[in-house]
Image (tube, rainbow, N blue to C red):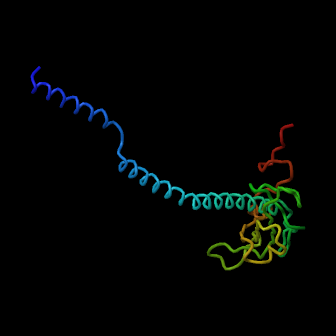
Amino acid sequence: MSRKQKARSMGQGAARCRCEARGGFSLAEVLIALAITSFALLALIGVLPEGLRSLQNAQRQEAEARILQNVAARHQMRPWDESSVGTQEEGDLEFDANGAPVQSGSKDAVYRARAEVLDAATLPNENTASPFMRRVRIRITNQLQMPGALENPTHFREKWATIVNLDKAAPAPAADAPAETPGTPATGTAPNP
């Protein structure tokens, strides 16, 4: 081989060596990738507390909605005269973290609620209150250890429900309609045995 050929082959070998050594990342490339990754992770970590707060708030609202339904249903199922204005529960009601009722003093109790029947509710476009409707004010707190939490407005959330006297709210029969007796259909025919 001539000198030129040897030099060329050596040059190609050196080039080949440089190419093979070029397979990794430089220090600058690694540092830039780490900086981008760390900024992304910091942004993600910064959002986590707000996400957790939102989740806890949603769980609290869901439990309070169940408590509201439970207390309103208790008052709706009572005889109408027992739910007169000013009536309160015999004691505070306690509920677990999901809003399900528990025994008073239970270790599972997370919420406490107090209900009071207030004045009759008025319908939209009506001037007088309906005698067949009443409002129920329900106070809910999750601060069970604090005495008087249901009296201090900063420690409870107030919800409202409306109860309706379904037995007496039915329209009166027409004057020419035959009177119904219990156990007979409205047509007046005898029931099938």
The residue located at (53%, 60%) in the rendering is: 46
- The N terminus sits in image quarter: top left
Percent across and percent down for residue 76 are 79, 62
Quarter assignment of residue 118: bottom right
Determine whether, in the image, residue 20 is placed left or right of residue 92.
Answer: left
Residue drawn at x 79%, y 60% as measured from the top left: 110
Q: Is residue 49 visible?
A: yes
Q: Position of residue 109 (x, y in %)?
A: 82, 59
Q: Nearer the viewer, residue 7 or 136?
A: 7
Q: Nearer the viewer, residue 182 or 106?
A: 106
**Place of residue 178 in the rendered image (x, y in percent of width and height, measured from the top left):** 79, 56
Question: Residue 176 or 61: which is nearer the viewer?
Answer: 61
Q: Position of residue 49 (x, y in %)?
A: 59, 60
| Residue 134 visible, this angle | no
The residue lying at 80 percent from left, 59 percent from top is 95
Would residue 79 be found to the left or right of residue 139 on screen?
Answer: right
Of 29 and 121, the residue lying toward us: 29
In the image, residue 160 above or below residue 193: below
Residue 105 location, quadrant: bottom right
* Left or right side of 46 for 118: right
Quadrant holding the C terminus: top right
